[in-house]
């Protein structure tokens, strides 16, 4: 593979004699690189997949939803400005606050930070693109189209109205019989898919597509933050997926998970929701903190103080944030000691947050600050976020929370945290990084105007809300009587909200006047030291540099010119297609050359049909919905058909004597990593289902089978287990057969997979029939509902396994599967064995746990 | 590298679920060796978890002096993270277990 990688691990600047590629470069090399990476023209631009375009569109879409959610906030503030106002009725007001929170959290905050990652990470790591460009495109289009359709539900009075956290029983079928709640439950579905797709892209991107030499100790803090952010999505989002599935099953089919009279418990929703919801706060904050850690050193012209501690703080925050969810449930009557554990963890998480804040302050103090717009937004962030952090410590103390819960004090707290911790860093980032994509930087005058309006507005609006809350004003009420004395404070908050809006308007005017993307960039106006400030085109950098420090542009003299002249790795496109270097996860040593797709329609179409599928389900037009679902799956198949090209090209010299293969299989492959991360998502969702099973048993053990009359005979699960094990064994055997089939597919492999497909589907039917044999029906009790859900969940995995098996067989028949060309098979095999393991655990718990209680 | 933080996660999950189960089944009156079952169990588990993380920390510190002269910057960086994460985990475990000595389990 790599023949000479000694230059990559050096800690000193590269000498002229050590450059991997000689100059002058051959005529036409740069022109070919530009041609290969050129975006399509006209309407075909929609099919662009590379990160420059998708990233900027993604950011633009998230800002659109920010503005829309802000307009909803202004409508609410107008309603609350004076007592007993009749501007907005209570029904619309309920939809407004639900949509405001949902849009801000699901359609602005998470997509915005993910979008920034899609745009910035390849730049920061000198990769030509992220490893799965079409996945990014799919994630963007599913989010954008679905998000717009979701927003439009407001115009038909169909928007969800149960609050952005959708607590049952209010949102179950008894009290919310319309389809408003379904819009939330199914509408959020595509956003979850989009977020998880983006997270997989980002994890593999950070770990596998870096500049040679950019080892973990030289990784930009932003990349660390995005890595932790994406991993948090992997472990947090499955909880909300499971929660929405359970509530939708209850609403659509009356399976009682949250109904107390049938053994359910509404607190199950709260546990699942906040197991996602609290990490969500840090999912939003950590990328923003990562941006701050990049902007502060550049604006202060000095390296970040305590880099290693800041990295530790990011990782520590990621872990601890999963131990905080109950602090949203302090008033639900949980045991005192349980509450105390979460109170303690809530205080402990202030340590890593504090480490970062002090590191930024120390960096600012040790350098010379450039008083430009990004610096203003950073200083505003430090002030507002610290204020939010302080009130956070207050509400982390249970006795205080009991008083402040569901009042405007809490509203003030989380707006300080979210606006301070995410919105201000994001605006700092817009002003800071705009010159990397726009031919003109944004205006200093309009930027500072925007900052002062937003900073003033935020403090006027939300500081006042602390007082309104302490005076007892509850959240989510559409009006109040004058005698309460809340009128003047509310009027001040409303004025402040419109001042914030004026600040955002100034920013939008600045964008309209100065933001000119996709042409030449505006250079490096801040004299920043990291790789995104190298001269770039749609192909990112002309050549891929060797990184020897955390601020290469400060430490490697003439780096920008050397990269532009093509002195480093991969100065052209040796495979005559889009490509990027895949590196090892720790040391960032080149491992292989990944050939990448160009403009592509299938991800766009798959996204459109995915959104249509979910909205068809919401509107209960099932036939068109399933047609769209089928089309979405077909588009995905079309898209992935050419993703396993096989070893059809010779190894490539990328410069410096390093010759890389263009096709690999197994754990080195980026594809293997993506599949493993997907399985982590699946496993987390399954654990959440098991948690639901045991939670329901804990609160209502009387609905669990008390004797063998309530459980299927052990012969049923034994037959299922045997079928599962046999299917896994056959897949394992077909892998061995494939290894003996060099150069072409094998009929024996195809046949074995077909038999294995039958065996993996059979246990789902056996499980359902087994429960029916003892007259257990899913609508009867929470026990029955959860065991049928586990069976249905396994059915879903069986369906995916069947699809994967048929797809792999089709590739075998088409001659696209062989001993050497086996990434498709390996991925199928991983998913297959996982599904079987999940099925066996499910069987063991459903059939053995109740027996262990007798 | 992050084994200590995983220990914290496992510890936290255990103490929360254990206390929840004891309270749900009204078992908080049970005693062992004259101590309530909840504070005693949590104290023992806290000490065990902290001791395990301490062992991870000592192992990471010792690996610094194992005679390997070819260590590069990323391995020393990862060792630093291991040690610092272990220290933070011990703090989080000790702090998390403290309420068991002060607060009634199911009050």
Image: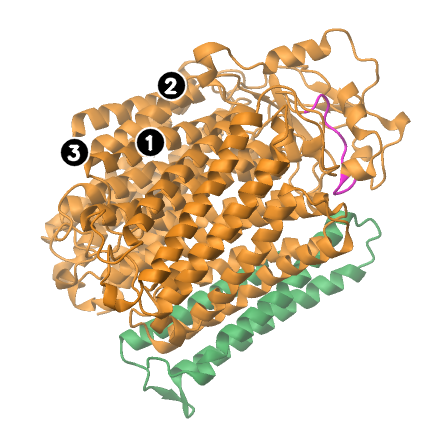
Chain colours: A orange, B green
Determine the chain carrying the residue at label 3. A
Label 1: which secondary element? helix
Q: Quadrant of the C terminus of chain B?
A: bottom left
| Closer to the camera in the image, A538 or A628 | A538
* Number of the label disc, if any, that sits on residue A148: 1
Residue A77 is situated, as x and y percent measured from the top left of the image, at 33, 50
User: Residue placed farthest to the left in the image?
Assistant: A775
Residue A638 image point, x, y percent: 39, 18
Q: Which mark is residue A810?
A: 2
Q: Say which of marks 1 and 2 sits in front.
A: 1
* CA neighbours of label 1 inside 10 A, class few (<14), some (14 to 19), many (20+): some
To which chain does the residue with label 1 belong?
Answer: A
Find numbered disc 3 in the image and state the secondary structure of the residue it sits on.
Answer: loop
Q: The numbered mark 2 sits on a residue in which chain? A: A
Mark 2, Cα crowd under 10 Å, few <14 / some 14-19 / many 20+, is some
Marker count (numbered): 3
> Which segment did they paint magenta?
A541-551
Q: Are marks 2 and 3 on the same chain?
A: yes
Farthest residue, direction bottom: B34
Please name the residue that numbered disc 3 is placed on.
A620
| First in residue order: circle 1 vs circle 2 | 1
């Amino acid at each position: 593979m790599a023949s000479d990688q000694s230059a990559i691990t050096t800690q000193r600047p590269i000498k002229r004699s050590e450059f991997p590629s000689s100059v002058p470069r051959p005529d036409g090399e740069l022109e070919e690189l530009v041609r290969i990476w050129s975006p399509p023209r006209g309407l075909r631009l929609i099919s662009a997949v590379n990160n420059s375009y998708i990233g900027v569109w993604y950011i633009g879409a998230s800002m659109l939803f920010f503005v829309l959610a802000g307009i909803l906030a202004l409508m609410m503030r107008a309603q609350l400005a004076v007592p007993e106002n009749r501007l907005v009725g209570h029904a619309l007001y309920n939809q407004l606050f639900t949509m405001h929170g949902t849009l801000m959290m699901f359609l602005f905050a998470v997509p915005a930070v993910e979008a920034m990652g899609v745009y910035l990470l390849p730049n920061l790591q000198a990769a030509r693109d992220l490893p799965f460009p079409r996945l990014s495109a799919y994630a963007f289009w599913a989010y954008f189209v679905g998000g717009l359709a979701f927003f439009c539900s407001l115009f038909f009075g169909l928007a969800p109205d149960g609050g952005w956290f959708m607590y049952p029983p209010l949102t179950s079928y008894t009290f919310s019989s319309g389809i408003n709640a379904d819009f939330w439950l199914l509408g959020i579905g595509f956003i979850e898919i989009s977020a998880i797709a983006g997270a997989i892209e980002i994890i593999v991107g950070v770990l596998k597509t870096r500049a040679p030499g950019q080892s973990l100790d030289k990784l930009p803090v932003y990349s660390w933050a995005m890595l932790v952010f994406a991993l948090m999505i992997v472990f947090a989002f499955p909880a909300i997926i499971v929660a929405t599935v359970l509530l939708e099953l209850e609403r659509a089919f009356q399976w009682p998970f949250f109904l107390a009279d049938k053994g359910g418990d509404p607190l199950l929703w709260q546990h699942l929701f906040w197991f996602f919801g609290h990490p969500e706060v840090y999912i939003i904050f950590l990328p923003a903190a990562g941006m701050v850690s990049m902007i502060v050193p550049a604006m202060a012209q000095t390296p970040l103080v305590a880099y290693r501690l800041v990295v530790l703080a990011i990782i520590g925050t990621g872990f601890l944030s999963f131990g905080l969810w109950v602090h949203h449930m302090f008033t639900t009557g949980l045991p005192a000691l349980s509450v105390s554990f979460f109170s303690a963890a809530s205080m402990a998480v202030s340590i890593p947050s504090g480490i970062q804040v002090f590191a930024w302050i120390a960096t600012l103090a040790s350098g010379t600050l450039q008083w430009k717009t990004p610096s203003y937004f950073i200083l505003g962030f430090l002030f507002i976020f610290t204020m939010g952090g302080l009130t956070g410590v207050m509400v982390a103390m249970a006795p205080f929370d009991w008083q402040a819960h569901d009042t405007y004090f809490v509203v003030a707290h989380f707006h300080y945290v979210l606006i301070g911790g995410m919105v201000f860093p994001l605006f700092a980032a817009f002003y800071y990084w705009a010159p990397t994509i726009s031919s003109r930087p944004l205006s200093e005058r309009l930027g500072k105007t925007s900052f002062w309006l937003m900073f003033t507005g935020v403090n006027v609006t939300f500081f006042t809300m602390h007082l309104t809350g302490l005076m007892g004003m509850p959240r989510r009420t559409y009006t109040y009587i004058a005698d309460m004395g809340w009128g003047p404070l509310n009027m001040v908050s409303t004025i402040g909200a419109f001042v914030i809006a004026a600040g955002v308007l100034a920013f939008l005017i600045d964008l309209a006047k100065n933001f000119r993307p996709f042409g030449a960039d505006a250079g490096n106006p801040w004299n920043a030291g990291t790789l995104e400030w190298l001269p770039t085109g749609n192909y990112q950098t002309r050549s891929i540099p060797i990184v020897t420090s955390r601020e290469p542009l400060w430490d490697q003299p003439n780096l920008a010119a050397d990269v532009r002249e093509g002195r480093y790795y991969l100065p052209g496109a040796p495979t005559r297609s889009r490509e990027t270097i895949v590196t090892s996860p720790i040391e960032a040593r080149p491992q292989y050359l990944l050939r990448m797709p160009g403009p592509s329609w299938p991800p766009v179409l798959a996204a459109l049909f995915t959104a249509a599928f979910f909205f068809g389900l919401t509107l209960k037009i099932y036939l068109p919905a399933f047609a769209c679902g089928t089309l979405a799956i077909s588009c995905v198949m079309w898209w992935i058909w050419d993703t396993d090209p096989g070893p059809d090209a010779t190894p490539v010299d990328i410069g410096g004597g390093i010759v890389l293969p263009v096709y690999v299989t197994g754990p080195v492959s980026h594809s293997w990593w993506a599949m493993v991360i997907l399985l982590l998502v699946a496993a987390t969702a399954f654990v959440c289902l098991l948690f639901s099973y045991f939670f329901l048993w804990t609160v209502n053990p009387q609905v669990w089978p008390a004797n063998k009359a309530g459980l299927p005979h052990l012969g049923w699960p034994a037959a299922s287990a045997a079928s599962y094990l046999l299917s896994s064994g056959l897949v394992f055997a077909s892998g061995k057969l494939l290894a003996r089939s060099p150069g072409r597919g094998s009929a024996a492999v195809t046949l074995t997979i077909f038999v294995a497909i039958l065996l993996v589907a059979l246990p789902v039917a056996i499980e359902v029939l087994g429960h029916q044999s003892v007259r257990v029906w899913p609508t009867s009790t929470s026990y029955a509902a959860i065991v049928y859900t586990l069976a249905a969940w396994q059915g879903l995995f069986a369906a995916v396994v069947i699809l994967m098996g048929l797809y792999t067989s089709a590739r075998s028949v088409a001659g696209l599967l062989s001993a050497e060309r086996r990434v498709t098979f390996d991925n199928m095999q991983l998913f297959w064995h996982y599904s079987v393991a999940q099925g066996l655990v499910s069987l063991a718990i459903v059939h053995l746990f109740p027996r262990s209680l007798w | 590298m992050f084994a200590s933080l995983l220990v914290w996660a496992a510890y936290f999950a255990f103490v929360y679920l254990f206390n929840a189960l004891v309270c749900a089944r009204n078992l908080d009156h049970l005693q062992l060796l004259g101590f309530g079952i909840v504070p005693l169990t949590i104290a023992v588990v806290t000490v065990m978890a902290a001791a395990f993380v301490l062992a991870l920390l000592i192992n990471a510190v010792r690996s610094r002096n194992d005679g390997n002269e070819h260590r590069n910057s990323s391995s020393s960086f990862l060792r630093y993270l291991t040690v610092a994460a272990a220290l933070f985990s011990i703090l989080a475990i000790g702090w998390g277990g403290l309420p068991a000595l002060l607060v009634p389990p199911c009050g």
